[in-house]
Amino acid sequence: MRGLAFAAAAALVLGTAADAAAADAARGQDLYESRCGGCHSLDANRVGPAHRGVFGRTAGTAPGFSYSPAVKNSSVVWNDRTLDAWLTNPQALIPGQRMNFRVATAEDRADIIAYLRQQSAR
Amino acid sequence: MSESIDLRRRGLMRASGVTLLSASAVALLAGCEKMAVAQTGNTAGDVSILNTALSLENEAISAYQIGAGSGLLQKPVLEIAVLFQTHHKEHRDALIATIRKLGGTPVAAKSDAEVAQALNAASLKNQADVLRLAQRLERGAANAYIGVIPSFGDKALAQVSARLAADEVMHWTVLSQALKDPLPAKALSFGA
């Protein structure tokens, strides 16, 4: 039983890594600009916070942005897994947040996350 | 329940004589505010979404103000920009009225100067630059309104979000034509 649980966990981790490796950052840029660009920019706080550097950042800590108390007080650190959960259903990850925008397709989320990871490194 | 909402909406629309988005949106919402509380118990969540939408509309109003005041737009593009700004003001007014009806507090708008800085308005050098910025913002706004639809507790508010998205797509289409951009080659080019 324990072996099965380990195998399932390993498959999940490997699956996430494989998804991240397969993600298309160039397509993610197009998706980011069309889906996220209404509220976000990489380098400026607008309706939502600036996104450059989001990878590895603790939620609610982008300089100069006024966050909801829910996000500000959360201990979420943005990585592949948490960003995927956030884009799937932000309210489920951090109840009381203000974004509420969802990206329904796993492939779209993976590509957007790949783009954010790429830009965070620059 | 939804039938009574529709009846109230039609009555208000008839009474006004002129059907404006703000009037119809508020009427729709005014008819469903009690239902939102009773059926979903998620009014605070819906108010939060509406406030985010209000921030987006405030930014659009400022963006068109910056464009119209830039001296870069010629007629008839200038007139179209002013008309689209009027639409966004009607969206803003409808959202503020609805947020208040639901017991929330509307967020304040940023100054035009703050928005200009965030949108890097200093880089706008000609009419096409202004149109391209407006086009980008309208597409983003349409997708934002589509992307929050599943998060609404109240289906009537989700419908309003779709109507707001439709306005933004209409703006995007006109701006794209002004820029002589090709039409989308594939269907379902907006939203998730």
Image: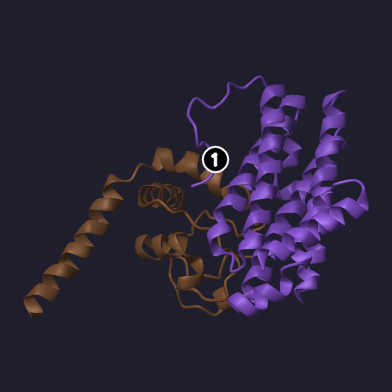
Chain colours: A brown, B purple
| Corner quadrant of residue B56 | bottom right
**Left or right, B81 with reference to A77:** right
Q: Position of residue A102 (x, y in %)?
A: 50, 57
**How crowded is the residue under tag 1: few (<14 C-alpha within 10 Å), some, or many (20+)?**
some
Q: Position of residue B184 (x, y in %)?
A: 54, 27
**Left or right, B159 with reference to A114:** right
Residue shown at 56%/69% (left/top)? A61
Residue ID for mark 1: B190
Residue shown at 53%/60% (left/top)? B150
Asked if one can make out residue B92 in the rendered structure from this viewpoint, the answer is no
Residue shown at 86%/29% (left/top)? B78
Between B59 and B89, which is closer to the camera in this rendering? B89
Q: Chain of mark 1?
A: B
Q: Quadrant of the N terminus of chain A?
A: bottom left
Q: Position of residue A50 (x, y in %)?
A: 59, 56
Between B105 and A19, which is closer to the camera in this rendering? B105
